[in-house]
Image: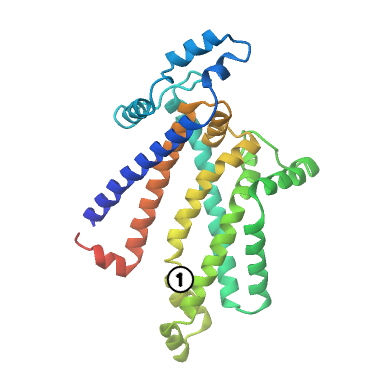
Amino acid sequence: MWRYILKRLVMMIFVVLGVAIVIFSIMYFIPGNPAQIILGSNASEESIQELYVSMGLDQPYLTQLGTFLSDTFLHFDLGNSYQSKIAVATEIAERFPRTLIIAACSLIVTTAVGIPLGIVAATNQGKWQDNTATLISMVGLSLPGFWLALMLVNWLSVGLGILPAYGVGTWKHYVIPIISNSVIGIANIGRQCRVDVLEVIHSDYVTTARAKGVSNHNVTFKHVMPNALIPLITSLGSVFASSLGGTVVIESIFVIPGIGLYMSNGILNLDYPAVRGGVVVIAIAFSFVMLAVDLIYAYVDPRIKAQYEGK
């Protein structure tokens, strides 16, 4: 098992390294001059060029890439933000807990709503419950997250005045962002759970249990659910990772000072260190989440556990 974990850790290194190279290349080749944004439109060409050179942006692509990779992975230095002049690592450490709260709570809501939705649909196949759950999933997949967020603000904040529309402070500030960030995940998990439960319901051992006179309740919760929920582990990990990445839009809409808003502002201001640092940190978090998912899956699935037992 330890060899499997080591193998996954090595793969994580290459994944994060690849993400770092891609985001560096994207920010390098997009048009725009960070020095001009920093100094403003009234600055002289000489001043802009002098700052541009002092920032090292005049160096060749490979030179800048090597410096970035060396600073990031050998010296663990993400640089300083062009706008705030504060270390990117410091900014991310302060903002990451807010992003993590939104992603984790979105996963909880997704699990609490999506799994029961799929179970009800599968155990009532072809009935109105199944049709209703399928309709809810289709609507959830069709709704753009940003549009839903704005509609919820218009209804719950502007109309009813029961929840704040933006910012952070109390737990109420996170309600609308979490709901907005959970809708697509609920739809995906609901559909996936329905498919997995239906597949197990029609398996031979469930048919045998029913033939022996086992009650529907025991068949569902002792035979169907333990096996049907195993494939959902991977899906839930992907949902959490998507929720983590989705905070870029959510935090921008609700002005939540997390990594998402930090990177969004960095993109607008061509703040290369902020964007690169945020993407690398999210990639690392994503990789650890997927590693945890793989380990949990290997632990709960006897087939995979036996495959790696003793390795």
- Residue furthest to the left: 310
- The residue lying at 52 percent from left, 67 percent from top is 193
Does 55 sit left or right of 124 as displayed? left
- Identify the image quadrant of the N terminus: bottom left
- The residue lying at 58 percent from left, 58 percent from top is 186
Q: x, y (%) of residue 179?
A: 63, 49
In the image shown, does 270 or 219 lie closer to the viewer? 270
Q: What residue type is labelled 1?
A: Ala
Residue that carries the numbered disc 1 in the rendered image: 228
10 Å crowding of disc 1: few (<14), some (14-19), many (20+): many
Q: x, y (%) of residue 153?
A: 72, 43
- Identify the image quadrant of the C terminus: bottom left
Rendered position, 103 above or below 91: below
Does 78 sit left or right of 98 as displayed? left
Tell me the SS state at disc 1: helix
Rendered position, 219 above or below 46: below
Does 232 sit left or right of 176 as displayed? left
Q: Quadrant location of residue 185?
A: bottom right
Does 242 sit left or right of 138 as displayed? left
